[in-house]
Image (tube, rainbow, N blue to C red):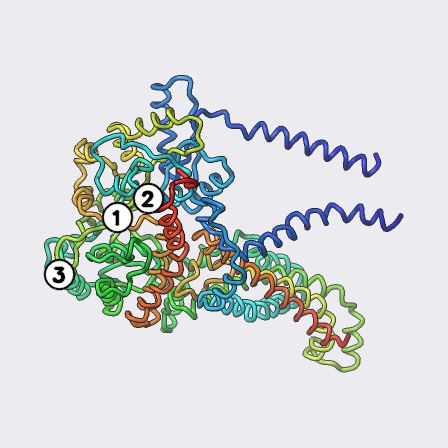
Amino acid sequence: MKASTALLFVIPALTLILLFVFIPLIGVLGFSLTDFNLYALASSANLHFVGLANFIHLLHDHAAWQGIETTMTVVLVGVPATLALSLICALLIESIGARWRGLFRTAFFLPVVCSTVAVAISWRYLLNTRYGLVNQLLAMAHLPTPNWLGTPGLALLAVTVVVVWKGFGYGMIIVAAARREIPDELYDIARIEGAGMTQQLLRITVPMLAPTLGLLALLDAAGYWQLFAEPYVLTQGGPMGSTMSLLLLMYDRGFRWWRWGVASALAMVLTVIMWLFAWLQRHTRAAWRGD
Amino acid sequence: MTFPARVGRNALALAVAVLACAGCARSPCDLNVWAVGVEASALQRMVPGFVRAHPNTRVCVENLAWSSAQARLLSAVAAGDPPDVAQVGDTELSTLVTLHAIVAQRPVVADFFPEALAVTRFHGRYYGTPWYVDTRVLFYLPAVLRRAGYRRPARTWRGWLKQLKAVRRILKPGQYPLLAPINEYEFLEVLALQQPVPVLRDGDRYGNFASPAFRATLRFYKRLFAERLAPRITDRQLINLWWQMARGDFVFYVSGPWNIGEFRRFLPPRDEHLWMTAPLPGPHGPGRSLIDGSDLVIFRDSPHQSLARAFVRYMLANAQQVRLFTLTGDLPARRAPWSLPPLAADPKLKAFRTQLERVRPFAKIPEWGEIMHGMRRMAEQVVIGGASVDAATDQLDRRVNYWLAERRALLKREDRSADAPAAGRRP
């Protein structure tokens, strides 16, 4: 009886997941094995099963490797940076007086609720080579004023900065809430035992927050693997494809050039990478906890 | 209420909603017209005139965005629910022809610019009616050019290069003689079209970017950046192009007719004398430019073919072509409206009128857009990445050949079935 009641509650969600996740996923897997493109849309006689040809093509496609590298860079740099910033800001706003706490919490959280496109457009102005605020400040300090969005390495850095700046406020709220859950007694005891601030941070705060941080890392990584809007608005994937994320590349292939076969293959690659990444993350966390 | 009962009631409500929506999906319009951006707004204002001539018809105009218009049209075609008439960009026309989605039309008037009409020609028939045209000319600052010692823009590449260098000498730091955003492929496309050798060969089956002609073009393009005549920036790195040009940040810019309107929108009337237009220079004399624009197409699945044809005919009349120009700045696809007051009186349109007689269409294949973007990325490798012209063009040819593989296979199959009786071929 209990099991069937539980099933009743789960069925709606399961149906939705089946309809909108698993069936499309199988569809994408199917398409990735065909040369589905514009000509196939004109006449199904032009649709052929091509086996793994799309994947082999991607293997030799510089753009695909560059896409993986770009996205992975954003994940590997962006996730730790977001976590660090979330942690630092959460601890800072928890340590200051209640009067200012609300103000800072709102200020840091604001980018999260802002429209990504609007935010990216604002950053485009800030980073303008000739009139942007960033370069005007650099010029005032007599520092070189680089062409931020026109130089490959710098453009990726700029995209990562925007992504981190846009995302860390969310983690900050979660970490701050988790921090409040840590019993004060632990700190009292630590102080009595003679532990300094650093020791308290490393021995109490960070370990107690570890599950929260682990969850945030997983969520952030999942989000950053799907990087799209920021490079789309800031750079359109340029210069020289240096900010072309996997998802942007997939959009390009699929919806701009109507190569759904190749685009589906890219989607499968992204799915597998994300699965691998999540698996790896879970197992390192488990190993770290000593389970 | 028990749980399953509620589910049942909700399901019933959902079913009712779905049925109701099946009714709402059936359009109350006699003629569904899809257009893009400002042209859609203009059409909306021209529809009442058409309705007066065709009483008791309801025309609905749907406004699409440029960025998603083709995806919307293609999805509608794939779903078997296209509009009756649509505005389609020249570059997208071949896609709809490939999909057998639109019908051939006889040209409604005789005085189209020949190249504009040629763009709509596939297999000897005309798919779509040229509605407005668009080409690229030089926008420049006459006062700066005069200060550099020249009365008007040069007609050859060599002369132009000399002018650009002379201009560079009198500019302030941070200012450049030429704006050629590295994410816009049209400038390089125009330079390539000016050469006698096309960038695709064998009936658009293979890339021809490694030809000496294109390599010469690319070297010229590379030089513009290498000698700091143009900045290595994208159009996304502009704050306000018109304001920046008026300040002298850039002296030359190759662009299209919409910028006449944009300059007037962003600059006060007293700055009107600051900028001018001129036909393009070429490798050895007045240069050719590209021809682009939009066509009005009628869909095969439309049940209102004759009304659709009447609509297209109405929009091509002199009065409507001029009205479209006044509402949007779009240039008439026919010659006659050009001698009517609003167009004939504007000195800045003269360069466009001259250039339109000297244009060259691009390859009419669905892959063209992808090939042009590939060309742009290759040019980026050369201009920013320091790749060699020879290696970059060889690599581009390999890429283009891959993109055209499907087309080659299709043409081969068509050739084979053309030898056999025409059974099984689609009309």
User: Which residue type carries mark 3?
Assistant: Gly
Please indicate whether residue B34 sits to the left or right of residue A215 in the image: left
- Judging from the image, mark 2 belongs to the subunit labelled B
| Disc 1 secondary structure class | loop
What residue is disc 2 on?
B90
* Closer-to-camera residue (B399/B38): B399
Q: Quadrant of residue A86?
A: bottom right
Q: Is residue B354 above or below residue A254?
A: above
* Closer-to-camera residue (B194/B97): B97
Chain-order first, disc 2 or disc 1: 2
Chain-order first, disc 2 or disc 3: 2
Residue B133 is situated, as x and y percent measured from the top left of the image, at 27, 41
Q: Are marks 2 and 3 in contact (CB under 8 Å)?
A: no
**Disc assigned to residue B159:** 3
User: Which residue type carries mark 1?
Assistant: Pro
- Judging from the image, mark 1 belongs to the subunit labelled B
Same chain, marks 2 and 3? yes
Residue A1 is situated, as x and y percent measured from the top left of the image, at 89, 48
Cα separation between marks 3 and 1: 26 Å
Q: Is residue A29 above or below residue A154?
A: above
Of tags 2 and 3, the one toward the viewer is: 2
Residue at x 16% of width, y 44% of height: B354
Q: Are marks 2 and 1 in contact (CB under 8 Å)?
A: yes
| Disc 3 secondary structure class | helix
Residue B137 is situated, as x and y percent measured from the top left of the image, at 22, 50
**Disc assigned to residue B361:** 1
* Closer-to-camera residue (A15/B238): A15
